[in-house]
Image (cartoon, rainbow, N blue to C red):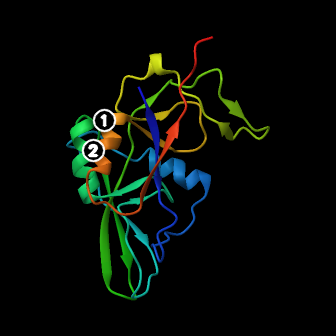
Amino acid sequence: MRYFQLLADDRVVYRIQPPAWSLLQQQELLTSVGLPGEEQLPLTVYVQGDRHTVYPDMLDSPAPLVSNSVKLLLEKFLPQIGWRAVMLTDIRHESQQLYWLLQPPIIEALSSQSTFRPDGTLQQLVLNNQKINQPIFRIAGLREPYVYINLAAAECLLRRSYTGIRLRRIPVEQKI
């Protein structure tokens, strides 16, 4: 099976830039997603844009955020997860955009062939195909809150006209 990292496309000119958050704030945000059907107040994130600002379908800062249309597609792959609404609010231009915090299940899929830098950040990721049982997932043991998807989910995303989404293929462990 093939797997891909789901990324925001930084080549989009004039895309909105939410403010940078500390690692502690990111972890707090990522643990704030409730169970399916559980009501939570939307989180408001203040942004500053101009008349050229583009709101892409995927943002990976301060955490993985997807537009409402991407959420509707991903829910078909992960009906059992909860979501939390995030409102990107531009007070100066009196606008709000609805995004959803993407928090898929965390699984143990790290291969022993993966390499890390001395500070503990990921250098080269290799997945263990035998341990993956989810179409969309995060990987346990990584500092970075990256989201990974299987080939079927990637093809569904690519068939639609989303903006600002990029996929990067991730190598799978080779048996020696």
| The C terminus - image quarter | top right
Q: Amino acid at mark 1?
A: Ala
Q: Position of residue 106 (x, y in %)?
A: 45, 32
Task: Say if 152 sits above or below 99 in the image.
Answer: above
Task: State the residue in front, 85 or 169.
Answer: 169
Give the alpha-carbon distance from disc 2 to disc 1, as whole Å.
Answer: 6 Å
Say few, some or many: other residues with alpha carbon within 10 Å of mark 2 (under 14 / 14 to 19 / 20 or more). few
Query: Horizontal placement of 120 versus 160: left or right?
Result: right
**Total number of numbered discs in the rendering:** 2
The residue singled out by tag 2 in the image is: 156
The residue singled out by tag 1 in the image is: 152
Q: Residue at x 52, y 21 (%)?
A: 128
Q: Secondary structure at mark 1?
A: helix
Q: Position of residue 82 (x, y in %)?
A: 29, 42
Asked if the residue under mark 1 is in contact with the one under mark 2, i.e. CB atoms within 8 Å, the reply is yes
Q: Amino acid at mark 2?
A: Cys
